[in-house]
Image: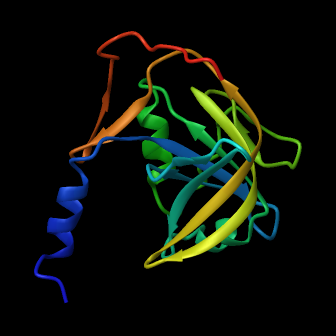
Amino acid sequence: MTNFTGREFRDALATFATGVTIVTARDGEGVPVGMTASSFSSVSMEPPLILWSAAKTALSAKAFHDAQHFAVHVLSAEQADLSNRFAKTGTDKFTGLDWSGDTHDVPKLSQALARFECTQWALYEGGDHWIIVGEVTAFEKADGKGLIHVGGGYASASALKPPTREAA
């Protein structure tokens, strides 16, 4: 038993800034599904693996649980409205958006700072979430500042010093 409330725990977690993504797939009927997720992380360079987590109570949780292919879209600082759109429950999130299908017909949003096309590598129980690991099969990257979620709101960040490139 813990000596803190769920709200206190959530507030403490909100002090950690995270990037904002939209994850897309198709459900068992072939209908496009998508959700906003800030639980995105790199896992491995070889093989190229990423992970994200989906609340088991989300309307599209089963679709993401069962999907063999999905795409993670890293949002730019200008895409808070798009993040909010995909965070809403029970709406058609794709109507009026510019998108196409990737090689597996996974919805690919036309604008993203980075996009990772993935094949499901593993799926783990994570309490009230599914932890979904994907092997990256293709990606695209654009220039710009990422959208960040911290303290219950959106922000963007600038580098404190220029990035250095190390030899791979």
For the point 73% across and 71% down, the residue is 66
Residue 157, above or below 22: above
For the point 18% across and 58% down, the residue is 11
Where's the C terminus, which quadrant?
top right
Q: How many marks?
A: 0
Q: Nearer the viewer, residue 124 or 26?
A: 124
Q: Is residue 32 visible?
A: no
Question: As drawn, which residue projects farthest toward the left?
Answer: 3
Left or right for 23, reference 6:
right
Residue 28, percent across and down?
Answer: 79, 70
Q: Nearer the viewer, residue 1 or 85?
A: 1
Figure coloring: rainbow
Left or right for 30, reference 57:
right
Where's the N terminus, which quadrant?
bottom left
Question: As drawn, which residue projects farthest toward the bottom?
Answer: 1
- Quadrant assignment, res 29: bottom right
Residue 90, percent across and down?
Answer: 53, 64
Q: Nearer the viewer, residue 135 or 164?
A: 164
Question: As drawn, which residue projects farthest toward the right?
Answer: 103
For the point 58% across and 54% down, the residue is 51
Residue 57, percent across and down?
Answer: 48, 76
Q: Is residue 158 visible?
A: yes
Residue 122, above or below 143: below
- Quadrant assignment, res 74: top right
For the point 56% across and 18% down, the residue is 166
Residue 132, above or below 108: below
Residue 53, percent across and down?
Answer: 52, 62
Left or right for 71, reference 53:
right
Left or right for 109, reference 29:
left
